[in-house]
Image (cartoon, helix red, strand yellow):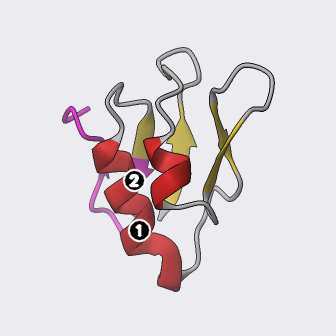
Amino acid sequence: MQLSIDRDRCIGAGMCALTAPEVFDQDAEDGLVLLRTAAPPPGLRATARLAAGLCPAAALTVIEQGGTGSSSPDGR
C-alpha cells in the first residue's frame, strides 16, 4: 500500500489526522494535510484506508500494491 496526498484539494477538515494520526498530520501554518508515512505498516493500513474514505475533499489516494490498482473515495 502506498498513499499520496493532494494538498491543492485539501480543505483542512482534519478527518485524516484525527482518524490516523500515525499516518497523517496537519500543517501548523495552513492546516493542510501532511503525510507522515507514504507506506504505512500492515497494522495501520486499515485505519489509513478509513481516513482516506472520510476525507470530504478526496485529497487522499490509496494505491494498492500487487496489481489491484488505485482507489480514492471519489473513484479516481
The residue at which mark 2 appears reads as: 51
What quarter of the picture does the C terminus occupy? top left
Q: Which residues are magenta?
A: 62-76
The residue under label 2 is which amino acid type? Ala
Residue 11: percent from left, percent from top = 48, 19
Q: How many marks?
A: 2
Q: Residue furthest bottom?
A: 43
Residue depicted at x 80% and y 22%: 29
The residue under label 1 is which amino acid type? Thr
For residue 47, the mark is 1
Residue depicted at x 50% and y 23%: 10
Q: In the figure, 8 relative to 66: above or below? A: above
Q: Secondary structure at mark 2?
A: helix
Q: Residue furthest top?
A: 8
Front one among 68 and 57: 57
Q: Main secondary structure of the magenta part?
A: loop
Residue 75 shows up from this direction: yes
Circle 2/circle 1 CB separation < 8 Å: yes
Occupied quadrant, residue 59: top left
Q: Dot 2, how many residues are within 10 Å of its Cα: few (below 14), some (14-19), or many (20+)?
A: many
Front one among 7 and 38: 7
